[in-house]
Amino acid sequence: MAVSKKNLAFSNKSPRDAVSVLFAHRGESGARRTCRLHQHAFWQLEVMLEGEIALRLPGGVAHRFPAGRAILFPPGVSHGFDYPDSRVRWATFKFDAACPAVQAQPLWLQRSGCLALLVRCLVASVAEPRSRATAIQAGVLAAVLAGALPAAPPAATTELVRRAREAIESSQGRTLGVAELAAELHVSPGHLASLFRRETGGSLKRAIDEARTRRAVQLLTFTNLRIGEVAAELGFPDGCEFSRFIRRRAGRSPSGIRKSVDVSKTGAG
C-alpha cells in the first residue's frame, strides 16, 4: 500500500507567538521503506498511532517506536525512520518555538500523566477546523515544551555550571565522574561540586547519575541491545555493577525494565 498523508493544519510564522505551527499531518503506510537520516531547523513532535516503526539516530542504533509513544526532536537533531510492510499510522507536528534547544538529542515523552494527555489533545485537534486547530496546537505544543524540557537553570548560574550541565548531557550517559568532569573543565572537584550545589540546590554526583539512568532506561526500552551491551555502552565494567546501579536508581533491574516493555508491547496487563 502506498504512503498517504492528510494535511491538517498550516500557519505562517509569527514572532509574537511563543509557538508557531508550521505543518501538521497524519500519515499512513503499508509499504516497507526508509526515510534516511535528516534534520530540520525547527522542532518536530512525532506520535505513533498504530503499528511500530524503527527510529534511526546517528551511530546506527535502531530504537523501537511503537504505537502510543511520542518523541520530540529539537532543531538540528538528525533522525530517520524505517517503515515495515505492515500498516502503520502516525501524526507529525512541526513548529517554531521561542525557546532554545537545550540538548542535542530527542526527548521521549511519558506515556502517562500530563504530557500524555497533551499529546492526545494534539492528535484530537486535527478534527477541528484549520484555523481553530492551529491555535489549539500552538498552545498545546507550548505546554508540551514546558513539561518536556529540563528546567532552566537559575539566572545567576555561572558559565562553569552551564558548561558542567552541557558536559553531563553530551556524555550520553557514559562514565563521567565528578573528578573526570572537573578535570575536563580545568577546576578542582571540590570547587565544582560546591558551586554546582550552591547554584542548583542539588548534588553534582546525583545530576550525573540521573543523566546516566535516563540513558540506560532509554536504551533498555527502545533498542534491542543486550543488557551487557547496554552496560558496556555506558562504561560499566560489568553487568553486575550495571544491575546494582539501575536497581538502586530506577527501583527495578535492567531485565525488569525490559520485561515491562515487552508486556506493554503485547498488550498484557
Image: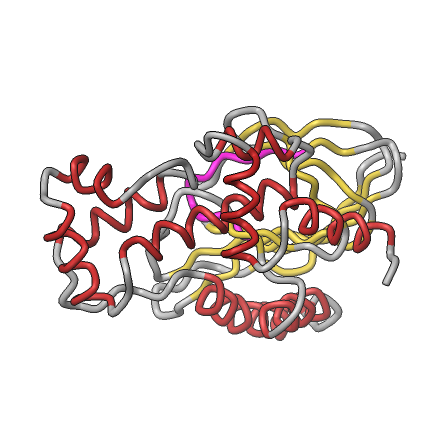
Q: Is residue 164 left or right of residue 247?
A: left
Q: Is residue 181 left or right of residue 8?
A: left
| Residue 78, magenta (yes or no) | yes
Q: Nearer the viewer, residue 130 or 25?
A: 25
User: Looking at the image, which residue is at 56% across and 38% down?
Assistant: 240
Quadrant including the N terminus:
top right
- Indicate whether 196 appears above or below 46: below
User: Quadrant of residue 177 in the image?
Assistant: top left
- Indicate whether 146 appears above or below 175: below
Quadrant including the C terminus:
bottom right
Q: Nearer the viewer, residue 108 or 210?
A: 210
Counting from the top left corner in percent of width and height, residue 120 is at 69, 68
User: Looking at the image, which residue is at 15% across and 46% down?
Assistant: 189
Q: Which residues are magenta?
A: 72-81
User: Quadrant of residue 202 in the image?
Assistant: bottom left
User: Looking at the image, which residue is at 55% across and 71% down?
Assistant: 140
Counting from the top left corner in percent of width and height, residue 33 is at 76, 27
